[in-house]
Amino acid sequence: MANAHILVVDDEVPILTALQKTLTLEGYSVDVAGGVKVAGERLARRSYDVALFDVALPDGDGVSLLKSLRDSGNEMPVIMMSGHATVDAAVRATRLGALDFLEKPISTDRLLLVLANTLRMVQAEAETRELRKATGRFGDLVGSSKAMQMLREQIARAARATASVLLLGERGTGKELVARAIHDASPRAKGPLEKLNCAAVPPELIESELFGHEAGAFTGATKQRRGKFERATGGTLFLDEVGDMPLAMQAKLLRVLQEHEFERVGGNELIKIDVRVVAATNRDLVEACKTGAFRPDLYDRLNVVPLVIPPLRSRRDDIPELAAHFLQLAARTNDRPNARITEAAIGALGAHSWPGNVRELRNIIERLVILSPDDTIDAVDVSACLGGGTAASACGLFRPGVPFRLLSEEAERTILQEALAHYGGQMAATARALDLERSHFYKKCKALGLRGADKGDEPAD
Ligand SMILES: Nc1ncnc2c1ncn2[C@@H]1O[C@H](COP(=O)(O)OP(=O)(O)OP(=O)(O)O)[C@@H](O)[C@H]1O
Ligand SMILES: [Mg+2]
């Protein structure tokens, strides 16, 4: 913490001068005071990151000065100095929260070490406070598993930066919720949060959606229209399903992110961007870069702060809390105020693999609330709901605007992933169990970016 402000209180001028010189050389800003009265004046005028108090002062003593500070609610870190440190003074000062006691003559090395440690601690405390302030605001994000706690901290950190954030996670893990949390905790919170779902907008319209267009830019463009980048000025642009962006569009997006300016479609006025980009995808972008489906240079641009949202099956501790949360929501919206769920039912939920993650859990709970004949949801209701249909029917694989090709690919990937996990990653065994031709199974896995545990098992093709 360079540039920290330090107050040194001592009545011996040579000591003051020496300390001021040493500390200034180290890059600290130093104020000095020769006694309690002047110290009080200095402290009234500004706050310091840390103070050094001599014990014996002409118009009082350092310990009393510390006491009056604490009495007035000032928690500034204080280090005491003394030429004749009495045990009594040391004990009193420590009780009042003095951080250290330096004996005179003061060793420069020890002084600098104590100061550095103190300032590091002050900074860490300030950061924790900030984090707490920010994390307290992610009210929508339920779950207190270790993974969620870490995620909240990452969100708070990402919120403070202005670099692009890339949210990676399976479908339904909460990417959109996290994007909103980042925006809400960022200095841009008062600005707009604009969203573009790159998979839902027809490829030929993405450009005008992002950058807007001038009147007459193309058939149907009767009026000038501002795009998402312009609307998000001063705020955040959330590029959802960025992995589904057509290649031609990826190139244009990259250019804009590099040059920080763009033109509306059909226009030539250069517009500066003042937008924080948060992108999300459930695709494996590294793999997509390899296959040529995604531009590596755009990936690097977006991936400045990567944030991985773990699948629900790897943070099962969150299930009871999430279930209670969604039960409350569903009970309210479906007018079943007395709906409750038994421990056993929660247990049954905990055992499911949740390929559709939190969204699937939310849907299942809602379905349970609607379908249960009485107000109590029990384990049998859960098994009937989860065990009955296939994963596809149970977890809302359908998403409006997403092409069938992508949806079925997702479903296939989920099935194969789960089957592979079930058979310990054994490719041959999994293929057999699924009654699939081995070579067909291998090809599928390869196309979907899946691997078994037994790599040597792959056919040479
Ligand atoms: N931690 C959470 N706490 C509360 N609700 C959550 C949480 N995570 C997800 N949800 C809810 O689950 C649903 C899916 O979340 P969201 O749309 O953010 O997921 P996603 O990762 O964007 O999914 P997709 O990849 O399918 O777009 C939403 O209704 C969201 O509110
Ligand atoms: Mg989403």
Image (spheres, rainbow, N blue to C red):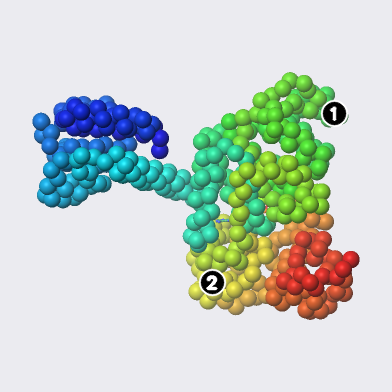
How many dots with numbers?
A: 2
Residue at horizontal 12 percent and vertical 37 percent from the top: 56
Residue under pointer 1: 218
Judged from this view, the residue extending furthest toward the right is: 461
Residue at horizontal 73 percent and vertical 41 percent from the top: 297
Q: Which of 59 and 167 is in front in this view?
A: 59
| Residue type, numbered disc 2 | Ile
Direction from residue 305 to residue 92 in the image, left or right: left
Disc 1 CB within 8 Å of nearest ligand 2 atom: no
Q: Nearer the viewer, residue 108 or 93?
A: 108
Quadrant containing the C terminus in the rendered view: bottom right
Direction from residue 18 to residue 282 in the image, left or right: right
Which structural element holds mark 2? helix
Q: Which of 114 and 184 is in front in this view?
A: 114
Quadrant containing the N terminus in the rendered view: top left
Residue at horizontal 36 percent and vertical 42 percent from the top: 116
Residue 356 image position (x, y, % from top left): 67, 62
Label 1 packing within 10 angstroms: few (<14), some (14-19), many (20+): few
In the rendering, which numbered label is found on residue 154? none
Residue 293 vertical position relative to residue 446 in the rendered view, above or below: above
Residue 224 image position (x, y, % from top left): 75, 24
Quadrant in the picture for residue 451: bottom right
Task: Mark 2 and mark 1 in contact? Answer it, CB < 8 Å.
Answer: no
**Residue 438, can we see it?**
yes
Residue 308 vertical position relative to residue 371 in the rendered view, above or below: above
Residue 436 vertical position relative to residue 259 in the rendered view, above or below: below
Q: How far apart are marks 2 and 1 (CA)?
A: 55 Å
In the rendering, which numbered label is found on residue 346? 2
Residue at horizontal 71 percent and vertical 48 percent from the top: 241
Which structural element holds mark 1? loop
